[in-house]
């Protein structure tokens, strides 16, 4: 049993335990494989080798494919009927007797595999309907649980079962994910934003205006300084925001294929949104709550903004401003001081 819980934080629902244990088994295995990198036997040490592309045209790395295979195999017989993965075109039925459906990004932050920067796994679990596709094409309010593993200096599982957020640190001596004492909660004040600023010229004017005002610091309408981060691993950005607050944005932009941003609703944004809300934060498309968004396809993308509540709310207000306000550098946005 690779998971040691502290029941003072509440019980883990019985129906979810076998799946969670299987996820932890693979999480611990991936942690070892990633830590050894080229010294290990797995994949001949070439974890980041390009091996193909997935349904969305994203390059698949050897570790993306391996992680997907390990999770799909380990989840058999754990109550999971439907398995939907970033790395598979369609929903897979892994156990006809199962009552659950699990969506997964088996390896998030693939561009960081070979550079020893934190990567992760994201998952969401909901009740299974009779049809796999129909199950996942529902809004995120159906989630029973969600979580991520972060493979960093520590390997950590952060999960919610709909009653706050729990975190479990992999103790490499015992091989167990042991529950850490203080549950994460997103602080209400923070001064960090995370966005891939190389796409500035492709953003719509409300996003540009929001970021312009952060960058203007004490001299701008916000009247204070901000710091910027971009790890290019959604799990790593999420974990930082879970620990010390801030805001993350991957908005839509004008590049081909980015009209709904980059991140996928079913197995990236909805599970993270559930965690963020349970930790006291907010998660939107910029204007609409992520957990209310209904995917039209399994691999649907969605603009994603999440973090400290008032920051996420502020982004929405920039979308309400008249065009002449958001296109001017600062304009009269003095009303946004603080
Ligand atoms: O390279 P970009 O455009 O900044 O995108 C980075 C984003 O892409 C992702 O790597 C996408 O996830 P995958 O690695 O699972 O495809 C996120 O983790 C990250 O936030
Ligand atoms: Mg991802
Ligand atoms: Mg991935």
Image (cartoon, rainbow, N blue to C red):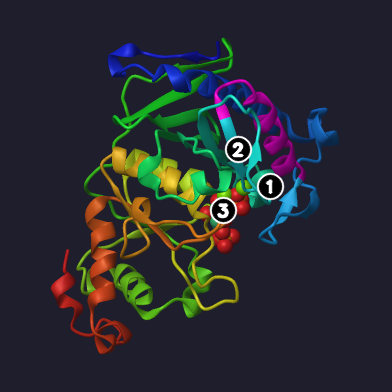
Q: Quadrant of ligand 1?
A: bottom right
Q: Is residue 81 above or below residue 62?
A: above
- According to the image, label 2 marks what residue? 83
- Distance of label 3 from label 2 (alpha carbons): 11 Å
At a point 35% along the width and 70% down the height, the residue shown is: 211
Furthest toward the bottom, the residue is 324
- According to the image, label 1 marks what residue? 88
- Distance of label 2 from label 1 (alpha carbons): 9 Å
SS category of the residue bearing label 2: strand
At a point 38% along the width and 41% down the height, the residue shown is: 142
**Percent position of residue 1, x then y:** 55, 10
- According to the image, label 3 marks what residue? 298
SS category of the residue bearing label 3: loop
Report the span colored magenta.
62-80
Which mark, by number, is residue 127?
Answer: none
The quadrant the C terminus occupies is bottom left
Residue 78 shown in magenta: yes
**Main SS class of the magenta portion in the image:** helix
**Percent position of residue 180, x then y:** 39, 20
User: Position of 76 compared to 233: left or right?
Assistant: right
């Amino acid at each position: 049993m690779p998971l040691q819980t502290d029941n003072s934080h509440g019980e883990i629902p019985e129906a979810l335990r076998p799946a969670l244990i299987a996820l932890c088994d693979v999480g611990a295995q991936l942690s070892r494989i990633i830590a050894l990198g080229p010294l290990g036997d797995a994949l001949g040490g070439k974890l980041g080798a390009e091996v193909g592309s997935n349904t969305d045209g994203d390059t698949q790395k050897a570790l993306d494919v391996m992680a997907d295979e390990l999770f799909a195999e380990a989840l058999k017989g754990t109550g999971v009927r439907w398995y939907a993965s970033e790395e598979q075109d369609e929903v897979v039925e892994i156990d006809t007797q199962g009552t659950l459906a699990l969506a997964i990004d088996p390896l998030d932050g693939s561009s960081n595999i070979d550079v020893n920067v934190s990567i992760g796994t994201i998952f969401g679990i909901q009740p299974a309907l009779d049809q796999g596709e129909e199950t996942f094409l529902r809004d995120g309010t159906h989630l029973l649980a969600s979580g991520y593993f972060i493979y960093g200096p520590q390997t950590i599982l952060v999960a919610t079962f709909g009653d706050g957020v729990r975190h479990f640190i992999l103790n490499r001596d015992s091989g167990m994910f042991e529950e850490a004492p203080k549950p994460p909660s997103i602080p209400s004040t923070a001064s960090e934003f995370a966005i891939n600023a190389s796409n500035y010229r492709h953003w719509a004017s409300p996003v540009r205006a929001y970021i312009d005002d952060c960058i203007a610091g004490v001299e701008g309408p916000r009247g204070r300084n901000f710091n910027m981060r971009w790890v290019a691993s959604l799990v790593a950005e999420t974990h930082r925001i879970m620990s010390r607050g801030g805001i993350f944005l991957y908005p839509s932009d004008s590049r081909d294929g980015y009209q709904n941003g980059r991140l996928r609703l079913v197995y990236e944004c909805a599970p993270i949104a559930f965690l963020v809300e349970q930790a006291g934060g907010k998660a939107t498309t910029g204007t609409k709550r992520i957990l209310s968004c209904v995917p039209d396809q399994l691999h649907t993308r969605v603009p994603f903004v999440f973090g400290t509540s008032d920051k996420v709310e502020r982004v929405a207000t920039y979308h309400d401003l008249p065009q002449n306000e958001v296109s001017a550098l600062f304009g009269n946005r003095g009303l946004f001081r603080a």
